[in-house]
Image: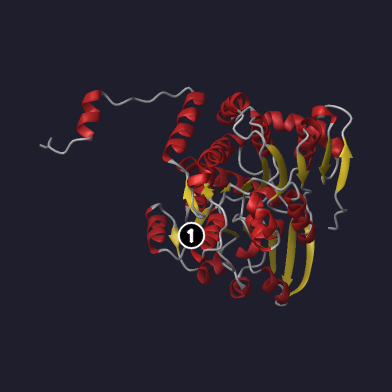
Amino acid sequence: MAVPARKVVQLKKKSPRGATVDCDVKDLSLADKGRLRVEWAGRSMPVLHQIRDRFAKTRPFKGLRMVACLHVTTETANLAIALKAGGAEVTLCASNPLSTQDDAAAALVVDHGIRVFAIKGEDNQTYYRHITSALESRPHLTMDDGADVVGVLHSERKDLLKNIIGGTEETTTGVIRLRAMAKEGVLRYPIVAVNDALTKHLFDNRYGTGQSTIDGIVRATNRLLAGSVFVVAGYGWCGRGLAQRAKGMGADVVVTEIDPLKALEAVMDGYRVMPMKDAAKIGDFFCTVTGNINVVRREHFESMKDGAIVANSGHFNVELDLESLATIAKDRSMVRDFVEQFTLKNGRRIVVLGEGRLVNLATAEGHPSSVMDMSFANQAMCSEWMVKHHATLEHKVYSVPERIDAEIARLKLKAMGVRVDVLTAEQEKYLDSWNVGT
C-alpha cells in the first residue's frame, strides 16, 4: 500500500517538554490503546524494568543518539522507554514492513516523545525511507534486527559512519550479514551479536518463535493442526521450538535440514527427516526457519497438495521463492486477512501467509513479552557495554560477554522467585584443581 510522506507532529499534551516530534506513524489517536498494551507487556518484563531503574540513575547514554531498527511492538516500546531513561535520544524505525503495531508506535510518540517511523503494511519504498529518516538523527549507536540499518549506512550514508561508536544486532540473519561484512573488511564499527547470548537464542528463538509462529498460523487460518503433516524447514533453535509446539498441537512433524548433525538430532527427538522435495508432496503446513534463500522453490510448490499452507518465520521473506510461485500461478487472490491464495495452472491452490514475511508478527503479535524481556535486556546491557568499551574494540562482530548473559539469567530467576545453589569453598577448590581423582 502507498504510505504518505512523513509528517512533523506538534504534541500538545503528555509530551516531554512539549517538544516537536518528527515521526511517521499511522494514527496518533491510537496512543491511548497503545499505552494500555505497552503497560500490559511491561508487566511481564521484570528484567528490563530492573535495568531501566538502574539506567535512570546512572544515565549511561547521556548525550548519545541511538537509532533502533526493530519490530515496533509493545515489547520494543518498553525497550525504547528504558533506553530513554538511560539518557539516550532514541529514534525507532521498523525492521519489517508487516511487524509494526500501530498503537504502540503512537504511544511512543505521544507519551514519550520518541521519534518513530513505522506503519504496518508499508511498501518497500516507504520501509527504506523510514530507515533513512531515522538516520537523519545522526546516531552514535545503532540497534538492528536484520542489519538493514548497517546496510544502509555502509552503502548510502557513509558520511554518518564517523559519528558511530558501535551497535548491536538481534537476529541470526543479521549476524550472518555482519560477519560477512567483517570478513570482507568493510564493517566500519564494532557490533555485539546479541543473538549469540544464551539468554537470547535458547529462549527467544526456541520458546518465543515456537509459540508465536503457531499463534500466527492459527490466527491467520483458523485451521486445526492436530492430525496434519507440519513441515519445519530448519532445525536450529527456532526450528526446534516450532517442531516442539507443532507436535504438542497434535501434528505429525516432518523436518528438513542440510546439516547432518541437526538432522540426526531431529530424528532422535522423534521427528521424520527428509529432503524438501519429498516433504513437499505430503505436507499440509510448511514453515521455514533457516535464514537462507529459496528454501521452498518452484519445484516444491508444483508438487504440493491442493490447499497446502506455506509460511515463513525467518527474518526475511526470501526463504520462500514467491516470484517463482507467482509465475506458475494462473490466479491469485486474498481470501482472508494476510492470507493469499495462488491457484496454479493445474488447478491446485497454494496458500501463503503474511506475504511470506515473519508470520508470528505479520498475522499475530510476535513473541510473548516474558521472552522478549531477556532479549531486550541483552540489547540494553550490550549497548551500555559498547559505550564503555568501544574505544578498545576492533571493527568486527563480538559475542555477548558471559557476565552479561549470566547477570540477565540471575535477574530473570530473581523475578521468578527461583533460587539456585552456590559453590562451597571446597567445591570451588576442587573445580580449580587437577590432583584430586579417584
Question: What residue is shown with label 1?
Answer: 255
Identity, as a three-letter code, of the amino acid under mark 1 = Val
Residue 151: name its quadrant: bottom right
Q: Secondary structure under badge 1? A: strand
Considering only vertical position in the picture, is 431 above or below 53?
below
Q: The C terminus lies in which quarter of the figure?
A: top left
Picture coordinates of residue 181 (x, y %)? 54, 62
Residue 89: name its quadrant: top right
Q: Is residue 155 visible?
A: yes
Residue at figure coordinates x 82%, y 46% from the top left: 24
Q: Can residue 201 be seen in this view?
A: no
Picture coordinates of residue 111 (x, y %)? 78, 30
Residue 381: name its quadrant: top right
Residue at figure coordinates x 72%, y 72% from the top left: 326
Q: Nearer the viewer, residue 354 or 120?
A: 120
Tag 1: Cα neighbours inside 10 Å, few (<14), some, or many (≥20)?
A: many
Q: Nearer the viewer, residue 4 or 113?
A: 113
Q: Nearer the viewer, residue 400 or 141?
A: 141
Q: Residue 235 vs residue 330: left or right?
A: left
